[in-house]
């Protein structure tokens, strides 16, 4: 099986940030924060250009499937992570638990969800609808989950200011893109590969900046290989718990095999794009953003590997 190139690029970026953290440092003359903010707005502008209102309208008909997917994405995932909070005692443990809650509260992916559902011969229109609408729901829901648990003593978590940032940097570009679909949708579809490369480049830039500052502040000194393996184990348990719960719910609702595939694939996905973007907006500057991003990056790699295998098997039926 081929290793996803983007996963390799993420690993390379982290290595680069370890050996050359000075470019991403807060004292760097390179304006990575400004470049990243502009890049993020452009990502969601192009997302708006490609987002089809007609497909969203048509997709509303299969409401049971959509409710299951969005409930799993924004309710089931966080509730499973909440079960472990009583066992967390140390400050380092709380930060890592918040990183898992952040992962759990993120929306689903768009492109990989649709591609994998297509390979597995699932309900592709429903996958397009759920993956598309999930990102918009996440703008409202993800900050609400974090607002409940980020220590208010930090003084930097202002939900009103966060929503203003999300509206300016994400929602308005999406709306502008949708408004200009008449002029730019054809170009966006024509240059889909180039836009995907641009999206990934911006994400790598944000990852580099976040890890550079984390390495500079020595955030990862206390994380051993054993800790990383333990984090990976929890991620696997979280994924398969949600995957099987969605499977049981799909059977109880008498879903077709195509709808069950879509529910399980879309309901277990988490977006690294939204994770990197939201982390810079939702968490105070005092938080170790590199540590916050660690679970979502590991989850991203694992979900691609696991879903690829499952999709290939289901596609052979």
Image (tube, rainbow, N blue to C red):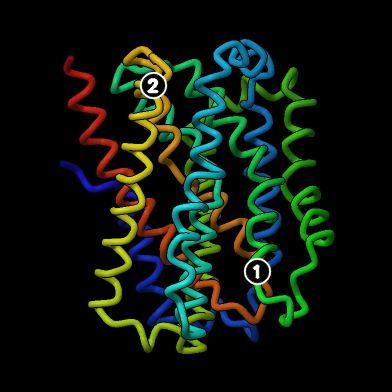
Residue lying at 60% horizontally and 11% vertically, measured from the top left: 61
Q: Which of these two is toward me, 194 or 240?
A: 240
Give 139 or 8, whichever is nearer the viewer: 139
Instruction: Decide: is 197 above or below 84.
Output: above
Q: In the rendering, which numbered label is found on residue 240?
A: none
- Name the residue carrying label 2: 252
| Quadrant the C terminus occupies | top left
Q: Quadrant of residue 7?
A: bottom left
* Residue depicted at x 45% and y 35%: 267
Give left or right: position of 51 versus 227: right
Camera-near label (2 vs 1) is 2
Q: Is residue 209 above or below residue 8?
A: below
Tags 2 and 1 touching, CB below 8 Å: no
| Left or right of 240 on screen, residue 146 | right
Q: Is residue 254 above or below residue 80?
A: above
Identify the residue at horizontal 55%, vertical 58% (top origin).
276
N-terminal of the pair, mark 2 or mark 1, is 2
Q: Which residue is mark 1?
A: 283
Q: Quadrant of the N terminus?
A: top left
């Amino acid at each position: 099986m081929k290793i996803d190139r983007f996963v390799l690029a993420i690993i390379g970026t982290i290595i680069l940030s370890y050996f050359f953290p000075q470019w991403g440092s807060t004292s760097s003359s390179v304006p990575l924060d400004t470049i990243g903010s502009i890049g993020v707005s452009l990502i969601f502008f192009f997302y708006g250009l490609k987002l089809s209102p007609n497909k969203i309208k048509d997709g509303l008909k299969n409401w049971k499937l959509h409710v299951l997917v969005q409930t799993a994405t924004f309710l089931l995932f966080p509730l499973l992570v909440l079960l472990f909070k009583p066992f967390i005692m140390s400050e380092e443990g709380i930060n890592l638990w918040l990183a898992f809650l952040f992962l759990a509260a993120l929306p689903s992916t768009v492109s990989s969800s649709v591609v994998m559902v297509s390979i597995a011969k699932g309900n592709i229109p429903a996958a397009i609808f759920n993956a598309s609408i999930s990102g918009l729901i996440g703008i409202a829901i993800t900050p609400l989950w974090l607002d409940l648990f980020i220590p208010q003593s930090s003084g930097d978590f202002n939900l009103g200011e966060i929503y203003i940032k999300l509206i300016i940097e994400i929602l308005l570009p999406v709306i502008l893109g949708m408004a200009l679909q008449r002029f730019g949708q054809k170009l966006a579809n024509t240059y889909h590969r180039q836009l995907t490369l641009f999206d990934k480049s911006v994400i790598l830039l944000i990852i580099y900046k976040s890890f550079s500052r984390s390495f500079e502040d020595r955030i990862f000194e206390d994380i051993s290989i054993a800790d990383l393996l333990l984090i990976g184990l929890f991620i696997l348990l979280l994924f398969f718990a949600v995957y099987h719960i969605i499977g049981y719910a799909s059977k109880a609702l008498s879903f077709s095999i195509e709808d069950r595939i879509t529910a399980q694939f879309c309901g277990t996905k988490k977006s690294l794009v939204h994770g990197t973007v939201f982390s810079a907006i939702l968490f105070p500057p005092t938080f170790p953003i590199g540590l916050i991003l660690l679970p979502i990056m590991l989850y991203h790699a694992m979900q691609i590997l696991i879903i690829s295998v499952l999709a290939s098997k289901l596609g052979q039926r």
